[in-house]
């Protein structure tokens, strides 16, 4: 079909549609209940013989930027923050937003140059893989807009005619610009409060739950003027303050400061990962083994390390030596450094010692791991551990940092506590918890009492594939290396 004929036919259809709308407006006075703006966007590729299957040329019109697959098995991410706002210009490869999966924090970048048309999610929302995060106007000249003017609110006839009407951007502009989580928006809706009237105290003016409650308490002077409320549970004021109906005979006056509000915390990122991981670990039978280790030699060794290091930025702790000695013990007991494949009933002995270290952060518990510990020196382990701690504190760990672990160490003793029962970080088959070091009296072989620096270690194992004897032999080897660090010299290459 000639292209000129198609254009002519399209123009005729537009004129016919405009006439039908004029007639509809005259016949339906109720069509004037609200302002709506209808427009039809005809992509240039629709009128071109080179049109793509999706009806849009690459680099033309409005393009949606979806949440791509951020890692194996990742189905959704939490949106942490936006780097752009509606109306901003963006360049190719410019960061648009930051999301957090179960494993890492990732920046989503733009594949196009253009202008931000619409942001579809707010920070704190959970976005599924494949959902559109933001619409970009890539090239406005690729889009021909046939405006049909302002029409007064849609009637049933207009809906049946197949017209797609959307609310005017001017009428929802302010509402969309108010930053608030869906939970806060729902709270404001239930209370009948307009979010635009509430000053936000959160980041970038975000309206928080506390802001809504604070706004509500300011209304106390209004509802306190009522001398008698027969059904307080049905009033908006009582609903706002979450008050129970008072006993009419008691004449008790309840004020706002007597109300204690519950606080709901949405679990996101690493906290959601912890829930999933612990649910799986709870189904596995655990075997726990407790051992007491004398660390007098380790205490002296740490002091010598601290004085001999020229790099002032390196802070020596007990953990690097414990991790390195653990790696030597794993060489003699490889079953402790294995992965269990439940579906195939296979126990895979891992060649690399990727030792994970549990870290408590403001964003939740995370377990990054030090790769190939068997090939690293104690100084290299120290530096890598400091890098991972810094990345965890700033929520800047990569997906590689938190994946591929073979065994986990939890040093809860750095905070406090002597004993614990750690749960496995599946599919790993073993985990080690370390208690705090204590100075306690002990007896020598001749009966003399002496002070000793003692540390408790608790080894947890998957009892489906690791028996108690294997755990005991492994722990004996590790204890020997910790109490006699000079034995490590026999294994150094």
Image (spheres, rainbow, N blue to C red):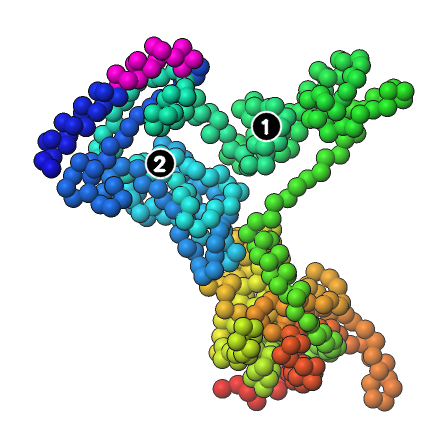
Residue 307 seen anywhere in this rendered image of the structure: no
**Residue 116 badge:** 2
Percent position of residue 316, x then y: 59, 68
Q: Residue 115 carries which label?
A: none
Q: In front: mark 1 or mark 2?
A: 1
Towards the viewer: 284 or 364: 284
- Pick the residue in front: 465 or 318: 465
Residue 340 located left or right of residue 222: left
For the point 17% across and 36% down, the residue is 47
Lateral position of residue 159 relative to residue 223, left or right: left
x%, y% of residue 368? 54, 64
Q: Which quadrant: the N terminus?
A: top left
Q: Main secondary structure of the magenta part?
A: helix
What SS does tag 1 mark? helix
The kind of secondary structure element at disc 2 is: strand
In the rendered image, which residue does mark 1 sit on? 189
Upstream in sequence: badge 1 or badge 2:
2
Check residue 456 for magenta coloring.
Answer: no
Segment colored magenta: 18-32
- Badge 2: residue crowd in 10 Å (few <14, some 14–19, many ≥20): many
What is the quadrant of residue 133 in the picture?
Answer: top left
Q: In the rendered view, would you say 465 is above or below 189?
A: below
Q: In this view, does 14 lie above or below 47?
A: above
- At a point 28% along the width and 28% down the height, the residue shown is 40
């Amino acid at each position: 079909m000639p292209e000129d004929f198609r254009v002519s036919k399209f123009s005729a259809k537009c004129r016919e549609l405009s006439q039908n709308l004029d007639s509809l407006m005259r016949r339906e006075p109720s069509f004037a209940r609200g302002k709506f703006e209808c427009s039809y966007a005809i992509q240039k590729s629709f009128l071109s013989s080179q049109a793509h299957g999706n009806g849009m040329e690459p680099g033309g019109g409005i393009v949606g930027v979806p949440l791509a697959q951020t890692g194996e098995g990742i189905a959704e991410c939490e949106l942490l923050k936006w780097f752009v706002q509606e109306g901003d210009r963006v360049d190719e490869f410019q960061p648009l937003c930051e999301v957090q999966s179960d494993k890492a924090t990732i920046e989503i970048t733009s594949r196009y140059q253009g202008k931000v048309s619409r942001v579809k999610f707010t920070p704190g929302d959970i976005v599924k893989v494949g959902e559109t995060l933001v619409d970009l106007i890539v090239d406005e000249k690729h889009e021909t807009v046939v405006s049909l003017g302002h029409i007064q609110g849609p009637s049933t006839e207009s809906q049946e005619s197949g017209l797609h009407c959307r609310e005017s951007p001017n009428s929802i502009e302010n509402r969309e610009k108010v930053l608030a989580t869906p939970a806060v928006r729902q709270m404001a809706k239930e209370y009948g409060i307009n979010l635009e009237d509430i000053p936000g105290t959160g980041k970038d003016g975000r309206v928080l739950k506390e802001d809504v409650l604070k706004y509500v308490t300011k209304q106390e002077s209004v509802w306190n003027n009522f001398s008698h409320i027969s059904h307080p549970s049905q009033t908006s004021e009582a609903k706002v303050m979450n008050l129970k109906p008072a006993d009419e005979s008691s004449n008790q006056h309840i004020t706002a400061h007597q109300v204690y509000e519950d606080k709901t915390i949405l679990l996101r990122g690493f906290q959601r990962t912890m829930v999933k991981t612990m649910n799986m670990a709870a189904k596995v039978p655990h075997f726990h083994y407790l051992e007491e280790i004398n660390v007098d030699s380790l205490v002296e060794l740490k002091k010598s390390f601290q004085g001999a290091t020229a790099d002032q930025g390196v802070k020596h702790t007990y953990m690097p030596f414990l991790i390195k000695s653990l790696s030597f013990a794993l060489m003699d007991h490889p079953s402790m450094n294995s992965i269990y494949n439940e579906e195939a009933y296979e126990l895979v002995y891992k060649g690399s010692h990727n030792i994970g270290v549990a870290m408590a952060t403001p964003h939740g518990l995370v377990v990054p791991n030090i790769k190939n510990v068997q090939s690293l020196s104690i100084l290299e382990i120290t530096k890598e551990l400091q890098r991972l701690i810094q990345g965890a504190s700033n929520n800047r760990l990569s997906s590689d940092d938190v994946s591929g672990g073979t065994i986990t160490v939890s040093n809860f003793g750095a905070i406090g506590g002597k004993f614990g029962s750690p749960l496995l970080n599946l599919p790993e088959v073993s985990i080690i918890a370390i208690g705090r070091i204590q100075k306690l009296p002990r007896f020598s072989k001749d009966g003399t009492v002496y002070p000793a620096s003692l540390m408790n270690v608790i080894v947890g194992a998957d009892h489906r594939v690791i028996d108690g004897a294997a755990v005991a032999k492994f722990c004996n080897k590790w204890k020997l290396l910790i109490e006699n660090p000079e034995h490590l010299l026999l294994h150094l290459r």
